Image (spheres, rainbow, N blue to C red):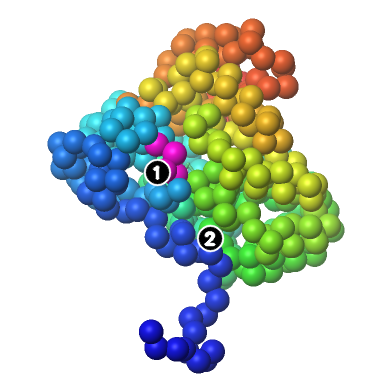
Amino acid sequence: MIPRSPCQQQPQTAPWQELLADAITNPDELLALLNLPRSLLEPARIAAVQFKLRVPSGFVAKMSPGERDDPLLLQVLPLAEELLPADGYSTDPLAEIDAMVVPGLLHKYHGRILLTVTGACAIHCRYCFRRHYPYAEASPVRENLPRTLRYLHQHSEINEVILSGGDPLNLSDQRLSDLVKQLESVPHITRLRIHSRLPVVLPERIDDELLKWISATRLKVVLVIHANHPNEIDAALTQAMHKLHSVGVTLLNQSVLLRKVNDDAKVLTELSQRLFDAEVLPYYLHQLDSVQGAAHFAISDKTATRLIDEVRTRLPGYLVPRLVRESPHQAAKTPLL
Ligand SMILES: *Cc1c(COP(=O)(O)O)cnc(C)c1O
Ligand code: SF4
């Protein structure tokens, strides 16, 4: 081995950034890792053209080899079904473009705004409503930050900023802490909410650098993670959540109700229990947004309400997520009762 002098070393990358860069994007590799039939390859390749396969290997390690209906695999494996046209499914089911007041800034609900700070995600969830989102025009962090801050200053009713994406924790801690400092300069902002699936798919993301700026901000921090199935919650995630809890972060989870993944009262019950063991409270259980390519995941409202009614008979109220649907042009997410 040739010894390297310090000046030849790569710029510093955190271990999580390397894991992120090593995510699996080749369907061939995923099928081989899991010992799955080659017949799945061709459809996966075709469906991946529209929305790429992407999954960190730590998440693959939570799947059962040889199990083509593994509930975690179903969330990431591109399938031929995605290419079937479905009535009522569109590329912008939430009409989010209408709520975009500054590029990347969605002001849809009273008192809180949502910033799409990056288009990138650590994992590509096949049901995602952002699979067709025009991210290129929607990154406020760099060129649009002055406009975003001006908007915030002008709207004193806004007290919460939600970082979303993409996945905001994909950004480096340097960029996040710079952004948070700018947001802190707006006196009426009191809460920072982060919507991220990264802690679930790559718990290594919760490292000392992240904890440092989170501990330092004057804003109350809420982290909403995204897990759909109890198998997603392992010891590493639980440990990461304990660290965040110990620095005062409020921890919540949102799930999407997905056919063959979690459309089962027992599975949803266990998910809530595992989350609670990790200091996380269930927040929302979303009915699927009608995005093109995701129709095969849909559950009827009737089945959804029956499921949540059953969960309610098994768990204390604080462990029952709110079953909601997001509709365009509504003042809040709509509860389904
Ligand atoms: C879901 C959502 C929010 C936050 O809604 P809460 O009910 O506060 O969780 C804010 N803005 C947008 C655009 C959303 O989709
Ligand atoms: S935005 Fe969330 S749900 Fe959509 S692909 Fe990224 S991690 Fe998955």
User: Observer-nearest residue: 55 or 223?
Assistant: 55
Q: In which quarter of the image is residue 151?
A: bottom right
Mark before the other along the chain sequence, 1 or 2: 2
Give the vertical position of 208 relative to 121 (above or below): below
Secondary structure beneath dot 2 equals: helix
Give the crowd class for mark 1: few <14, some 14-19, many >=20 residues within 10 Å.
some
Which residue does the numbered mark 2 point to in the structure image?
16
Kindly indicate the quadrant of the structure image that contains residue 174: bottom right
Which quadrant holds the C terminus? top right
Mark sitting on residue 60 = 1
Image position of 280 (left or right of 117): right
At 45% from the left and 19% from the top, the residue drawn is: 263
Q: Where is residue 145 in the image (x, y as percent from the top left)?
A: 63, 66
Q: Residue at left 54%, top 43%?
A: 200
Whether residue 132 is visible to the viewer of this picture, yes or no, is yes
Residues under labels 1 and 2: Cα distance?
16 Å
Residue shown at 52% from the left, 14% from the top: 265
- The kind of residue tagged 1 is Val
Q: Where is residue 280 in the image (x, y as percent from the top left)?
A: 68, 35
